[in-house]
């Protein structure tokens, strides 16, 4: 019973309603790949609907999705088996809608996911007079204030650059694909997908229901795992593997559009874990402090725990907003800052282990988790105290009216420079790991 109460208290530390790691992933993804020959110099590919791909490759997909399930059972801790009724079976006579639903159900993603034909334009090179899609045509989640999303319509048969496809798709899992997938979610599909109760976060908040798929606490102390074993129930490795192997299959079978698009989808989960607030339960807080806050909360004194929750959320959101503003401002001004250079820099790529099925856990998440305490200290030093050190301030509520670049211009230049350098380092990891993942996918597909 004592362990149960620890778990309940610790679960409250993961409470941010929005769990985006790097804002709009397409912004840094364009920079990460714009000098990678395998992507930037790849020939344009023909746009194809998801339904056309599924119909053409039913039998290979049946075998692949079965192999994905076997891999997950062997490689993912606390993996909840997919109900056998959801297995994908080739049925050539069914309708396109039925086949699509069977595919999404076998992946266990939200069946109302759009998978529209679109791309997000490079903010550094916007297209002239594009045909735009409304937010709701691409994304099932509500449009947020000051949204950076811009969706350019594509048509089947149209030619598009692989760079645009992979950069755009790297942002797509934040468009509702992982929403309401648990037993206690307010959806029909969550009750049949077999993921169990939501391990952390608030099931009533739509954004929060995707958190266990976009966060991975794989490098915490054994004490925390004993007190709160549910924090191991995270699934970014599953999603990364599912989409990476789908990408390799699409390339092998002559569907390069979906090869690049699935590659981008797989990258999203890796990229999320390069952000320390997605790879550590509470960056900057010791295990002893976490357990101490929980003990006090169990005794009816929840002030310390509640304050930690707010500060973690505020720092997470402030980091994301500041990084997005930096990239947006640089693109508008046509500036090549240290962040853009770090994203493109491939010098570090070969210094990491060769790509493998557990690279996301053993290399990406481990590196990010180790960066957590340093990042928390830099945020506290550089940001206005009210935003990141005041538990009575809710950054998420006030975010749309805050310009962090302007705010930090008033702060100590040396502290801001250190934070900017840390963000450049982290986005350098984002770029290097993304490129290594693509090399792994292309190798698996026989294209490298």
Image (cartoon, rainbow, N blue to C red):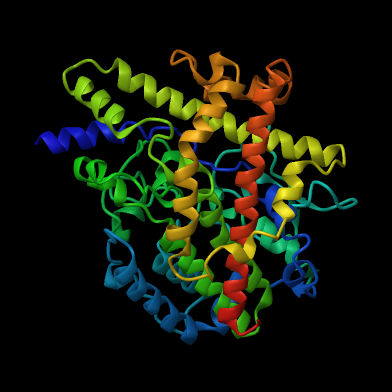
* Image x and y of residue 434, in percent: 61, 60
Task: Decide: is 87 above or below 139.
Answer: below
Residue at the right extreme, as displayed: 128
Left or right: where does residue 374 sit relative to residue 292?
right
Taking depth in this image into account, of 399 and 275 the one nearest to the observer is 275
Say which quarter of the image contains residue 263: bottom right
The residue under the point 38% across, 26% down is 309
Left or right: where does residue 188 sit relative to residue 429?
left
Whether residue 176 is visible here, answered yes or no, is yes
Whether residue 52 is visible here, answered yes or no, is no
* Numbered label tally: 0
Quadrant where the N terminus is found in the figure: top left
Taking depth in this image into account, of 328 and 351 the one nearest to the observer is 351
The residue under the point 71% across, 49% down is 342
Task: Decide: is 381 above or below 203.
Answer: above
Task: Decide: is 16 above or below 189.
Answer: above
* Image x and y of residue 335, in percent: 85, 41
Taking depth in this image into account, of 291 and 8 the one nearest to the observer is 291
Quadrant where the C terminus is found in the figure: bottom right
Taking depth in this image into account, of 92 and 139 the one nearest to the observer is 139
Left or right: where does residue 100 sit relative to residue 29?
left
The residue under the point 89% across, 50% down is 129
Say which quarter of the image contains residue 310: top left
* Image x and y of residue 120, in percent: 73, 52
The residue under the point 44% across, 32% down is 16
């Amino acid at each position: 019973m004592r362990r149960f109460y620890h778990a309940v208290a610790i679960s409250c530390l993961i409470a941010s309603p929005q769990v985006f790691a790097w804002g709009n992933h397409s912004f840094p993804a364009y920079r990460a790949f714009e000098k990678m020959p395998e992507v930037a110099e790849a020939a344009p590919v023909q746009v194809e609907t998801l339904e056309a791909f599924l119909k053409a490759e039913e039998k290979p997909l049946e075998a692949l999705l079965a192999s994905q399930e076997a891999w997950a059972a062997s490689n993912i801790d606390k993996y909840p088996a997919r109900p056998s009724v959801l297995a994908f079976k080739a049925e050539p006579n069914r309708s396109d809608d039925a086949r699509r639903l069977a595919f999404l159900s076998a992946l266990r993603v939200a069946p109302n996911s759009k998978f529209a034909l679109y791309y997000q334009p490079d903010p550094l090179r916007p297209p002239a007079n594009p045909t735009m899609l409304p937010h709701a045509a691409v994304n099932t989640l509500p449009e947020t204030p000051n949204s950076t999303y811009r969706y350019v319509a594509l048509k089947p048969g149209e030619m598009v650059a692989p760079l645009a496809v992979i950069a755009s798709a790297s942002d797509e899992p934040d468009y509702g694909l992982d929403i309401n997938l648990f037993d206690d979610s307010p959806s029909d599909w969550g009750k049949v997908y077999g993921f169990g109760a939501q391990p952390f976060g608030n099931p009533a908040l739509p954004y929060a229901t995707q958190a266990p798929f976009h966060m991975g606490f794989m490098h915490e102390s054994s004490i925390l795992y004993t007190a709160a074993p549910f924090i191991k129930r995270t699934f970014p490795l599953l999603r990364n593997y599912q989409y990476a192997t789908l990408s390799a299959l699409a390339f092998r079978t002559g569907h390069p559009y979906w090869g690049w698009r699935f590659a981008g989808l797989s990258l999203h989960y890796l990229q999320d874990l390069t952000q320390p607030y997605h790879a550590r339960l509470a960056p900057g807080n010791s295990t002893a402090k976490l357990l101490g806050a929980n003990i006090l909360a169990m005794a009816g004194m929840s002030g310390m725990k509640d304050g930690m929750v707010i500060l973690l959320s505020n720092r997470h959101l402030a980091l994301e907003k500041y990084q997005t503003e930096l990239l947006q401002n640089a693109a508008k001004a046509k500036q090549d800052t240290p962040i853009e250079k770090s994203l493109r820099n491939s010098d570090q790529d070969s210094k990491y282990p060769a790509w493998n099925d557990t690279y996301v856990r053993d290399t990406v998440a481990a590196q990010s988790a180790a960066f957590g305490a340093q990042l928390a200290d830099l945020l506290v030093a550089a940001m206005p105290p009210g935003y990141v050190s005041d538990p009575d301030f809710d950054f998420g509520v006030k975010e749309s009216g805050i310009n962090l670049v302007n705010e930090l211009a008033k702060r100590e230049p040396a502290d801001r420079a250190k934070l900017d350098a840390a963000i450049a380092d982290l986005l350098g990891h984002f770029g290097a790991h993304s490129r290594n993942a693509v090399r792994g996918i292309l190798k698996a597909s026989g294209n490298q």
